[in-house]
Amino acid sequence: MKFVLWLVLAIAAVVNVASSFAFSGIEQMVISGVTGLTVIATATGLYLTRDRRAA
């Protein structure tokens, strides 16, 4: 599960950067918004599935 989340996170980050060069205007805004939400969701998923260690 963590591998898939890391993979999606990496792909979303790459697509977000690439969309800045490949698109402009509303297309770039939509792609950036979708990839941004994907990054937030996968980062949250990774945070919730982390190994918790007792202090």
Image (cartoon, rainbow, N blue to C red):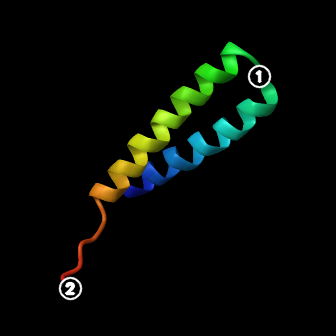
Task: In this rendered view, identify the residue nearer to me: 11 or 48.
Answer: 48
N-terminal-most mark, 2 or 1:
1
Q: Residues within 10 Å of mark 2 (few under 14, many from 20)?
A: few
Residue 36 in percent (x, y) is at 52, 36
The answer to whether any part of residue 1 appears in the image is no
For label 1, the SS is loop
Q: Which residue is mark 1?
A: 23
Where is residue 41, by image quadrant? top left
Q: Residues within 10 Å of mark 1 (few under 14, many from 20)?
A: few
Task: In this rendered view, identify the residue nearer to me: 25 or 35.
Answer: 25
- CA distance separating discs 2 and 1: 47 Å
Residue at x 57% of width, y 40% of height = 12
Residue 22 in percent (x, y) is at 80, 27
Query: Against 6, is 27 above or below?
Result: above
For label 2, the SS is loop
Marking on residue 55 = 2
Residue at x 61% of width, y 29% of height = 32
Query: Against 37, is 42 above or below?
Result: below
Q: Residue furthest top?
A: 26
Query: Against 47, is 53 above or below?
Result: below
